[in-house]
Image (tube, grey):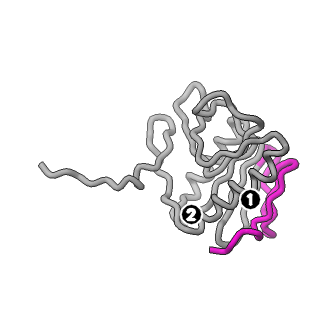
Amino acid sequence: MRATFIPLLSLIAEYVEGRIVYRSVPQKPHSKMQSFLDRTLYNIAHPLGFEVWVEPRIQTHSARPHYRIPDVCVTLGEPPEDIFTTPPFLCIEILSPDDSAVELRGKIEEYLSFGVTHVWIADPVSLRGEIHTQDGIQRVEDGLFRAGAIEVDLRLTERP
């Protein structure tokens, strides 16, 4: 019997209603943006009482098995549990070439239904994106993302 090789990178996934949803494997622009957001948000949000998390596991529905992993998220204070069960203040998804628009829209809707106040979708190449809230969608053309008192200018990151 021959062993099957499964690259570890192919195992990056979320769990949604009994099915495994594979996440795209990030490339350099995604990684640089994730690092920039982690550092920048910590410097801006931490003094305001927020905590910044990179790829935490979030259970977005208590009655159904829904687990999502945002690229970066911000919580008010530190959640008491290892797997977050309360909505973060902000979830950020950084676009990768392999991302599916349908999966991304589903994830945004799930975050907002769960009670996440702000969802940012950031393109690490164009430095544009969207801010999603219960009130609607705001397109970001100038690289300036906002969530309440938190403001991040993606134009300050190094270009990949």
Q: Name the residue under label 2.
A: 96
Sooner in the amino-acid sequence: mark 1 or mark 2: 2
Q: Give how far across and how far down residue 131 sits, in percent.
A: 76, 55
| Mark 2, secondary structure of its residue | loop
Would you say residue 106 is visible in this rendering? Answer: no
Q: How many labels does the image show?
A: 2
Query: Between 149 and 49, which is closer to the camera in this rendering?
Result: 49
Q: Does the magenta stretch include residue 142?
A: yes
Single out the residue that lies furthest toward the left.
1
Q: Give how far across and how far down residue 44 sits, in percent.
A: 81, 52
Would you say residue 154 is visible in this rendering? Answer: yes
Q: Name the residue under label 1.
A: 130
Marks 1/2 in contact by CB < 8 Å: the verdict is no
- Which amino acid type is marked by label 1? Glu
Vertical relation: 31 (above or below) 62: below
Q: Give how far across and how far down residue 19 sits, in percent.
A: 44, 40
Mark 1–mark 2 distance (CA, rounded to whole Å)? 15 Å
Q: Which residue is drawn at 68% across and 32% down?
A: 79
Q: Give how far across and how far down residue 56 sits, in percent.
A: 59, 42
- Which amino acid type is marked by label 2? Ser
Viewer-nearest of labels 1 and 2? 2
Instruction: State which region is magenta.
Output: 133-160
Name the image quarter holding residue 30. bottom right
Q: Is residue 23 left or right of residue 54?
A: left
| Mark 1, secondary structure of its residue | strand
Q: Which residue is drawn at 68% across and 35% down?
A: 114
10 Å neighbourhood of mark 1: few (<14), some, or many (≥20)?
some
Q: Residue at x 71, y 41 (%)?
A: 112
Q: Residue at x 65, y 45 (%)?
A: 53
Q: Does the magenta stretch include residue 134?
A: yes
10 Å neighbourhood of mark 2: few (<14), some, or many (≥20)?
many
